[in-house]
Amino acid sequence: MTKQRFRSFASALALGASLFATQTLAKSDITIAMQLEPPHLDPTSAAAQAIDSVVYTNIFEGLTRFMGDGSVVPGLAESWEISDDGTVYTFKLRDGVTFHDGTTMDAEDVKFTLDRATAEDSANAQKALFSGIETVEVVDPLTVRVTLKEPNGNFLFNLAWGDAVIVAPESIENIKTNPVGTGAFTFGDWVQGDSITLNRNPDYWGDQPALETATFKFISDPTAAFAAMMAEDVDVFDNFPAPENLPQFEADPRFQVLVGSTEGETILSTNNKQEPFDDILVRQALAHAIDRQAIIDGAMFGYGTPIGTHFAPHNPAYVDLTGNSVYDPNKAKALLAEAGYPDGFETTLHLPPPSYARRGGEIIAAQLAEVGITAEIINVEWAQWLESVFKGKDFGLTIVSHTEPMDIGIYARPDYYFQYDSTDFQALMDTLNSTTDPEERDRLLGEAQNLISNDYVNGYLFQLAKLGVAKAGVQGLWENAPTAAIDLTGISWDE
Amino acid sequence: MSRNLILGAALSSMVVLAALVSFVWTPHDHAALDIPAKLQPPNVQHWFGTDHFGRDMFSMIMVGARTSIAVALVAVGIGMALGVPLGLTAAARKGSWLDEVIMRGNDLVFAFPSLVIAILITAVFGAGAINAIIAIGIFNIPVFARITRGAALSLWEREFILAARVSGKGAARISAEHILPNVANLLIVQGTIQFSLGILAEAGLSYVGLGAQPPTPSWGRMLADAQTMVSFAPHLALIPGFAIIVTVLGLNLLGDGLRDWLDPRIRVARV
């Protein structure tokens, strides 16, 4: 054997050894499945939750951010001062933060982001979050002063939303296909219809995450989801679409099941402007005709917490109002007779694709039939639902889960798709928005919950559970979903 | 009568009987939910078990048979009602522009995969039993038109037709009085086959959510609902699947048997 040959042989051996060594180290890549593919990757110009799931805290960060337990902590803002009257917020930004394209994140970017969100032609899906902002001033490169029109106790919470992440003017043009943020992961590749890959950002300002790459895979069909998980093609399913399969995962030592809460109030949305639902007696009859527990057991196989108003039960301000709408078909019939519909009436029930809606809808239609209401089931795809129900308001009833956090404020918008128009409620929300005292806020929130529950605006069904399935070795997943997010920074493999 | 014919007739009439009986009697209310009693395997009380909402599967299969048969029957009816006259006309006017228009129109419909177009039609006009019937019916038209034209063309060459023409009968009258009765056997056999295909098409459309809408039970949708539960409640998928197999097998055997029995050429050959 010549020297040359020997050398290559030795290096091959060494290479083999090093390969072996990396394999015994903890895995640093992960494949996470989710049901819906994002339409694009700009969280500041669309309501689609799938966008936030991919980019929130991974690619983009805001001044503040949500943690897995729902608390709001400093993000790109290191600290802040609030003036005594509660209208001026002075944010001190973190030093040395750069965007993935190398440009510096400074006060100008914050001003750009907030001005863009509040602009007349803003495409932001949650403009209400920013509506209280009067001016945004750059004090120095690391200090921003935000002046509000009036005090807003929710302001720091609002800034933690995915719709409020900081973006840069340099990279805004292609943000939808090539998102450039400040987060611990950079955008890698997007195979349309299949997956999105993110890579670790070596220049991240905070702690380096344990993962090197993460792949988000889109699997919409529940049967395919089950097969992919069982075959171990994916490591994590963010929110597993078929609750009936969870016992099988629980019984299998290869997997862990994480059942947590989401911000999703699942409701039987009622068109308050359409006859006969403009009559409160009819809406009250609906509420008493529905057996929530049967829906939770039948549609969700027991996963879900009954709610009696539009509020998350895990929130400290929650008031249990399920007593307002106890299942009582006889009372429902009596109420219908009182409202002038002794023989019931006919209406439509539009059902989007998730199983809570499709299965829940079949159960509700059967329950409504018991009291004489004929609800014609119309199964629709999401695009159709957005077009005809959400925008067109052409529906009688529909089932949908409202997954935005703390979204009771939608009841103060008379043009919102269920068209609840109550000056009392709108005044209450105005008072709430200008109140900063936490105890007083909780009291007002309680009052608001009571108001919509007593007005029977919608049929309040249950709080959607988050049904996470993961391989046994995955650690650091969010059990609950205080906002739509799959926070990769805390995820690691336990080998 | 052949064994096929007897077996086919028995299976088919069993399904038809179940559908008819369901109008007056089912063991349980097919639409009544009983969530605590869900996912029971077959037992004394529920002969075919219960589904994920606790509904009685036996009752659902019986009423589902009604849906399948109604959709397939009307669809075949549409195909015959429009296809046969078209075929007769084309044969009577053989070689004319009318014949060309009818037969090229048929080719056009034939050129598309039938289920794909059925999905397109229901997707555009909305899901539901009526649209499923129309979608399936449209694809039965060229089948009957072709088979009628083919059989009628050979009849037009025969002496008895010549005799009818000599006696002064017009083409329309000859078609109705002499051609149609002589192709009827063929149409009955083809109708049976198309009927079984219609049942399959209805199940397929319901499976993808474009057939009869809930709460109307449908075998195809029962299969779709069972998908994620096959691993722990196999009866949910096996029972509607078996119902479809029995029906389609029965109708195909019946069609085969009828052909052997009715087809004059085979009958002559046997003698």
Image: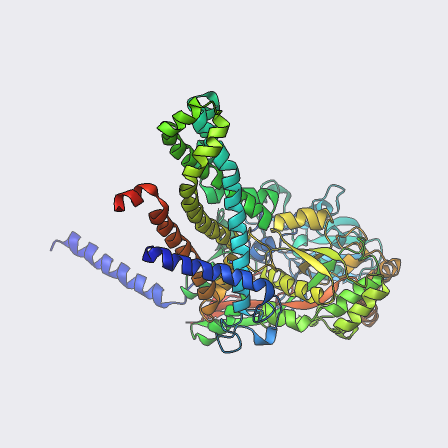
Q: Nearer the viewer, residue B36 or A391?
A: B36
Q: Is residue A136 visible?
A: yes
Q: Dividing the picture into quarters, in which one does residue A70 lie?
A: bottom right
Disc tally is 0
Residue A121 in the image: x percent, y percent?
73, 41
Classify residue B174 as left or right of residue A277. left
Residue B10 in the image: x percent, y percent?
41, 60
Q: Nearer the viewer, residue B245 or B21?
A: B21
Q: Dividing the picture into quarters, in which one does residue A289 lie?
A: bottom right
Locate the N terminus of chain B by quadrant: bottom left
Q: Nearer the viewer, residue A408 or B154?
A: B154
Residue A100 in the image: x percent, y percent?
55, 49
For the point 53% across and 77% down, which residue is it?
A: B45
Residue at the outermost front position: B167
Q: Is residue A41 above or below residue A366?
A: above
For the point 70% across and 58% down, which residue is it?
A: A375
Residue A334 in the image: x percent, y percent?
82, 69
Residue at the outermost left position: A1
Q: Nearer the viewer, residue B174 or B81?
A: B174
Q: Is residue A101 above or below residue A333?
A: above
Q: Dividing the picture into quarters, in which one does residue B56 lie?
A: bottom right
